[in-house]
């Protein structure tokens, strides 16, 4: 069994991705890289003994393993920060900013986004003087902007449409904050540093959201996060570690 660990792990990764995509009813981000990793592990099993027989390739493999170990340590450190970051603040704020997360069947909020919207409903029930900013544009596989589908979801559950502010131009988290800032300042007739904003997202997303919020000029903000569905925890938290690196390197306000 020990000899086949790479094949078994590769097959499990592929089966996991197929399963979570079926269970969630929508395409889960980062699925393709995980499938590719699974395939690479299976291929590696079939050629690893030939590599070890070649001294040059074997030395190269050892170097790769060293870099993989370093990468794994960095990955675990980032995961530790993501997991431990504060995610649930009950403080009353002026605006609740709900970040988009994708649609199922082109028109319906997916399970992750529904969790965020349900969290927004919890917040507005505790503080009905606040306004809800729904941030999300239209993706290539969506029939309408995410924020429009989000608004429909909230209104069907009793949220006053006059309490909803739509931001429908953003295509990623950085733009969520950039364009929502404009909406909040226009609605409040105040500078962003004069209002309090509660960022509503999912637990795995709280740390990176806070980084991007600060980068876009948000000062008085806190987080209120919905829990990740259990079967999505491995793929969402793994993806988020790489997303944090990407945001640090490329996302600018």
Image: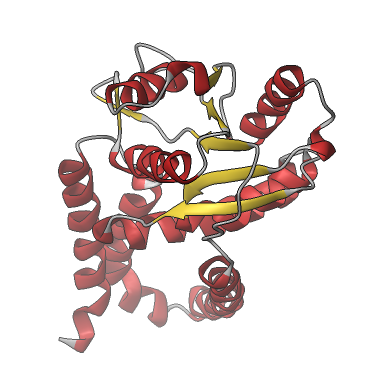
Spot the residue most to the bottom: 2
Where 192 sits versus 147, above or below?
Answer: below
The image quadrant that residue 120 belongs to is: top left
Q: Is residue 166 above or below residue 10?
A: above
Q: Residue at x 59, y 23 (%)?
A: 170
User: Colour scheme of this structure image?
Assistant: secondary structure
Q: Quadrant of the C terminus?
A: top right
Quarter where residue 146 is shown: top left
Q: Position of residue 93 (x, y in %)?
A: 64, 44
Q: Quadrant of the N terminus?
A: bottom left
Residue 234 versus residue 228: which sits nearer the camera? Answer: 228
Q: Position of residue 150 (x, y in %)?
A: 39, 25
Location of residue 101 by image quarter: top left
Q: Is residue 94 left or right of residue 227?
A: right
Q: Position of residue 231 (x, y in %)?
A: 24, 59
Kindly tell me whether residue 180 is visible in this rendering.
Answer: yes
Task: Tell me if 26 is positioned left or right of 148 in this view.
Answer: left
Q: Nearer the viewer, residue 95 or 25?
A: 95
Q: Picture coordinates of residue 157 (x, y %)?
A: 28, 28
Q: Which residue is at 50% across, 75% downward? A: 61
Residue furthest out toward the top: 143
**How many numbered badges does the structure rendering display?**
0
Q: Is residue 37 visible?
A: no
Residue at 70% of width from left, 52% of height from top?
211
- Closer to us: 105 or 213: 213
């Amino acid at each position: 069994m020990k000899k086949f660990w790479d094949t078994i792990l590769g097959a499990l990764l592929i089966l996991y991705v197929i399963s979570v995509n079926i269970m969630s009813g929508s395409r889960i981000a980062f699925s393709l890289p995980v499938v590719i990793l699974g395939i690479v592990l299976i291929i590696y099993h079939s050629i690893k003994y030939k590599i070890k027989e070649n001294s040059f390739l074997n030395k190269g493999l050892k170097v790769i393993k060293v870099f993989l170990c370093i990468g794994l340590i960095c990955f675990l450190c980032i995961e530790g920060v993501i997991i431990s970051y504060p995610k649930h603040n009950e403080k009353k704020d002026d605006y609740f900013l709900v970040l988009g997360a994708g649609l199922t069947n082109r028109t319906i909020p997916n399970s992750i986004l529904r969790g965020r919207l349900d969290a927004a409903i919890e917040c507005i029930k505790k503080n009905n003087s606040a306004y809800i900013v729904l941030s999300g544009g239209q993706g290539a596989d969506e029939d309408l902007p995410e924020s429009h589908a989000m608004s429909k979801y909230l209104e069907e559950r009793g949220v006053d449409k006059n309490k909803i502010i739509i931001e429908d131009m953003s295509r990623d988290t950085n733009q969520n904050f950039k364009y929502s800032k404009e909406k909040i300042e226009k609605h409040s007739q105040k500078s962003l540093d004069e209002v309090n904003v509660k960022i509503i997202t999912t637990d795995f997303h709280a740390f990176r959201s806070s980084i991007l919020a600060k980068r876009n000029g948000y000062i008085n903000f806190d987080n209120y996060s919905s829990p990740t569905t259990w079967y999505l925890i491995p793929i969402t938290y793994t993806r988020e570690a790489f997303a944090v690196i990407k945001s640090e390197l490329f996302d600018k306000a």
